[in-house]
Amino acid sequence: MIEVENLSKTYVDAPVVDGLSFFVPEGQVVGLLGPNGAGKTTAMRMMTAFLPPTEGRVVVAGVDLDADPVGLRRQIGYLPENVPLYPELRVEEYLRFRADVEGVSRADQPGRLDDVLGRCMLADVRRQLIGTLSKGYRQRVGLAGALIHRPPVLILDEPTVGLDPNQIIKIRELITELGRDHTVVLSTHILPEVEQVCERVLIIDHGRIVADGTPDALGSRLIGNPTIRVELRGADAAAEALGQLPGVVAVEARGGGVYSVEHHAESDPREAVFRLAVDRGWVLIGLNPERATLEDVFVRLTTADSAIPAPAVEEV
C-alpha cells in the first residue's frame, strides 16, 4: 500500500532524511518514532507530496509520487502536527469546504459530515467558530478533515497532541478502528500510545531507520535471551540453586529476594522454579516474564550508534 524507496532530503549538504526504505501493507497501523530532529515530519511531508524529496521514490495505493503527485494526495488523509484551519469558519463549514476540495459529491456530503463529526467527537461544536475552539478540539477538526473523503491511507503527525486524557483514549480507539479499513502511519512521542495501537514500529534516528518490527520483537532482540523475574521470601542461596535449573543461562540477584533468571529461548523454567521453591520451603511471591519496553528500545537506539538488526526473512 505504501512503498518508500531510498527517500532522502538534503538541506545545504546536510541530510535530514537519509535513504529511508520501507513497505507498509494494506490495513497495517505503523508507528513512526524518533527524537526531535530525527526526520519524522520531513519524511511524512515527502510521503504526502507536500515536500519534494531530494531523491527517492514514494508509491501510495499504486500512485507514484513523481508521476502523479495530485493523484497521490487523493489517496491520503494527512493530519499535520500544526493543523492549518480557518478560524472564521464554523466546524461544519470547514468540513464541507474540505469535502469539496477532496472531491466528495454534494449528495454524499451530509452522510460523510455526520460520520466524521461523530467519530471525532465534534457533534456538540459543529456550528461553533473554529477560532473559539480549544487546541484539542481544533486537533479533532483536523482529523475529521483528513477522514472526510475516506482515503485508503492515513498519515497522522502527533494526532493526540493537545488532547485531555479522556479524548486521548477516544482517539486511540478511533485509530484502532480506522486500522481495520485504512493503512495508518502515525508519529507520536507517547510511547505507550504506540504499544497500544500500532502493530509495527519504525524508529528513525539522524534520518535513518534504526529499527523495524513489532514492539515485542524489538524488545526481544534488544535483551537477547528471555528472562523471568522471580521474587522469593525465606530463600537462602537462591541464586546458586536457580542457576542449576535446566535451561537457565544466568541469574542476577537484585536484592530484596528478587532474581532475574535468564534462560534459553527454547526452555521455560517457571515450573522448575515453582517446584524448587516448594522443595526448599521458600515462599514464591512472583514469577513473571521480563521484556524490554518500547521505551527501553527507543532510548537504547537513539542514544547509541548501533541499530537492532532486522529479523531474518525466509524466502518463499
Image (tube, rainbow, N blue to C red):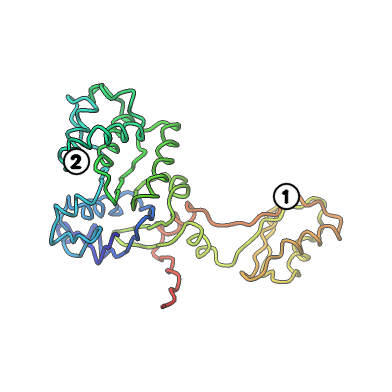
Labels 1, 2: front one: 2
Residue underneath mark 1: 256
Structural distance between the alpha carbons of marks 1 and 2:
64 Å
Quadrant housing residue 123? top left
**Residue 2 located left or right of residue 103:** right
Q: Residue visible at 28% across and 41% down?
A: 147
Q: Could you say where residue 257 lies in the image, as x and y percent from the top left?
A: 74, 52
Q: Residue visible at 39% across and 53% down?
A: 29
Q: Could you say where residue 9 lies in the image, as x and y percent from the top left?
A: 20, 59
Q: How many marks?
A: 2
Residue underneath mark 2: 104
Q: Residue visible at 36% across and 35% down?
A: 119
Q: Secondary structure at mark 2?
A: loop
Q: Secondary structure at mark 1?
A: loop
Quadrant housing residue 107? top left
Q: Could you say where residue 294 lies in the image, as x and y percent from the top left?
A: 48, 53
Between 124 and 261, the one nearer to me in the picture? 124
Between 109 and 147, the one nearer to me in the picture? 109
